Amino acid sequence: MKTLRRTMLYVPGNRAAMVKDAHIYRPDTLMFDLEDGVPYPEKDSARMLVYYALRTIEYGDVETAVRINGLDTPYGRDDIEAIVRAKPDLIRIPKTDSADSVREVEQIIEEVERKIGLAVGTIKLFAAIETPLGVMNAPEIARASARLVGIALGAEDLVTNLGTTRSEDGIELLYARSRILFAARAAGIHAIDTVYSDVCNDEGFIAETRLIKQLGFDGKSVVQPHQIDMAHKIFTPTVEEVRNAERTLTALHAAEERGSGVIALDGKMIDKPMVTRARRILELALASGVEANKELL
Amino acid sequence: MKIERTGMAGSLESSDVLVTIDPNVGRGVEVVLKSIAESRFGKQIRLLIEETLSELEVVEARVQVEDRSALDCTIKARLVTAIHRAAKMSHPDWEHLS
Amino acid sequence: MEFRTVVLSYPPDRESLERFLGERGLSLDPDIDYAVACYDGAEIVGAGALSGYVLKDIAVAVEAEGAGVASAIVSHLLAEEGRRGLSHLFVFTRPAAEATFVSLGFTVVARVPQRVVLLENREEGIEQYIAALGSERTTVPGISGSIVVNCNPFTLGHRYLIETAARECEVVHVFVVDEERSLFPADVRFRLVQEGVAGLGNVEVHHGDKYIISAATFPSYFLKEPSEVVATHALLDLTIFGGRIAPALGITRRFVGEEPYCEVTGTYNQIMQQLLPDFGIEVTVIPRLERENAAISASTVRNAIRDDNLDLVRSLVPPSTYEFLISEEAMPIVRRIKTVNSRH
């Protein structure tokens, strides 16, 4: 299973050039958008383009995701019917308000998987939370399905719903971000932050990405290729972080070899969260090209 | 599939194709292809168009394809979309689309 | 870069577009029914519009050239046309833009040097039209004449004009304007012309299609425009007629009725008399048939219909037209004439 989702790059599903090339920018995940990035009259065209692209183009080790239209639109069902057959790694559900929303989508995906003889559960899910109700229901949403591997914040509409506007420091999103993150961690899945749409403001993007990393997010949605490198750098662990992680994992392996039950380091127990964190740092390091010992993973 | 009206899909942007399908009553299938890559890929593109028309059982149509260096999957996607739009079919038969 | 529809009835949208076009020496044509603008932040960097099946008023800011803005705008407009079910499309643009449109796959139909170029999205569009006119008849010995008519509806005035031409020619080709901008639908107008000339053995009736007095070749016919624009349109229409259509049929004469009422037609006729001789076509102006000192014209007939003056109508049109006007099929048209106040 994919462990790194530092960047999820939006690719408007109706733009042929981007659909075919976007993986060269090497985001961790490519998100083909059939929803808000595609005008209404072109929904059918975008669906078909993404369908054929996924079945034909070799995207390599870049994870593929498709943001479908909601089931409350005329397009959602057709999107699922088509896209499951194209077998992306993930399907992203927009504007998820409740656990039921997730289950409804899952049911249709399962129907199609059975129809085409694909092992049920193959296609994973991502849920985007974009409304106050969704934020309040985040803990239930995060646990709604075994297929759900992550939840994401979609701030554009949310902020309007809250009755405010997006500010530079993002204080208005603090609660939403925190709640989504906590819900994700409690359920053991990924938490991804919203897009930073002012594509000319690199400083703003960097500041926001640093903030969400500090909050604990696994990654950020991006809309422009140049944002990918900036985000990846921010998610790159420092040398010190890498050394500490290696030390922890080395201690762990040594203890396992000795057959010790409880593993202590520096007077403290090495518990599961510590191990997960150490592994994650190592993976980030390796993905970012920082020197790290792969054997320890 | 029966072509009932004009169906258009795609665009003139680089790496895309613009496909226009019109009814062609009593005149079978006519394909007009405009591509910069005519000499290298013209034959391949025409074959793809013919195969797709045959797959969707289109026997009467005027198909105009404006190629801007698109991949086969793009040509196919736009062609299939245009055919469905021209046939006024909003739900493709996914079981039988290759 | 963001594309937004220009809401033509919303003044701020419309004014932004007009300003952008104005800065580039273009003005927004009054017959535009759809327009799109490409924004870079708050600035328009490109725009394009449609009138029916004609793309026009397309412009891109110099700074945005080469950024695919032109192809994106044209793609947007083509997609809109596709949604309307229109696939045979034309572009009306400045000569400097010819190369751009050719690279986007359009084919030149005709040029008016320094003024305008007309292109279409079919390589053999006009060729197919001309072929369908049946050019086997070019081998007719003697004079081939021509008349272009709208016939809204066909009157005794039209008949007189055609008869006069038919006396002087071996064959007369009558082209009926196909645009649906008149109170009488194009198919009805065409049929009334055919019926009206049935007795004349040497008259061929043809559709003008999109190549003669159409929204593509002479939009001014359907609008009130400043005379400068009318002149450009007239030159385009007549260049196509003189350069492509007339030679295919061996046409060397064109007949036209005197135009006392309509300024646009008057300008067109003037330019026709100047230009067509360059193509070897002699233009003959025939005075209008009069009844009680007034020239018989289709608008006179429409006014009579509006006034329910059937006696007057009967005196102005041939029996074939009159039979139609009192028929049930004509009722919706008659109703429309009575309620609409239109030049056409």
Image (tube, coloured by chain):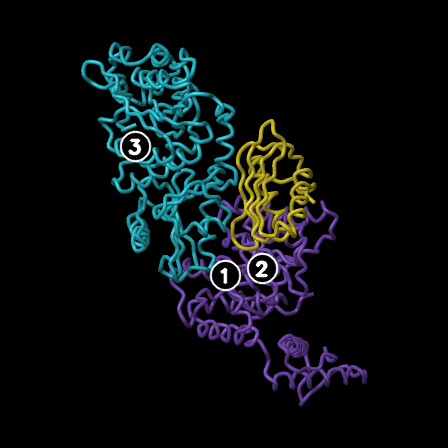
Q: Amino acid at mark 1?
A: Gly
Are labels 1 and 3 assigned to the same chain? no
Spot the yellow chain and give its letter.
B
Residue farthest toward the left in the current orientation of the protein: C293
Q: State the residue position of label 3.
A: C273
Q: Which chain letter matches label 3?
A: C
Please state the horizontal and vertical placement of residue B10, each as a whole percent of the image. 54, 47
- Disc 1 and disc 3: Cα gap in Å? 67 Å
Are labels 2 and 3 assigned to the same chain? no
Spot the cyan chain and give its letter.
C
Q: Which chain letter matches label 2?
A: A
Q: State the residue position of label 1.
A: A154
Write down the quadrant of residue A256 in the picture.
Answer: bottom right
Please state the horizontal and vertical placement of residue B30, each as a whole percent of the image. 61, 36
Where disc 2 sits, the SS reads strand
Q: Residues within 10 Å of mark 1 (few under 14, many from 20)?
A: many
Viewer-closest of A76 and A203: A203
Viewer-closest of A108 and C97: C97
Q: Amino acid at mark 2?
A: Met
Q: Is label 2 or label 3 in front?
A: 3
Write down the quadrant of residue C333 in the picture.
Answer: top left
Spot the purple chain and give its letter.
A
Quadrant placement of the C terminus of chain A: bottom right
Please state the horizontal and vertical placement of residue A224, each as a whole percent of the image. 51, 65
- Disc 2 and disc 3: Cα gap in Å? 63 Å
- Disc 1 and disc 2: Cα gap in Å? 14 Å
Instruction: Please indicate, yes or no, whether residue A98 appears anywhere in the rendered image.
Output: no
Q: State the residue position of label 2.
A: A31
Along the horizontal axis of the image, is C103 left or right of A271? left
Please state the horizontal and vertical placement of residue A47, each as a whole percent of the image. 58, 49
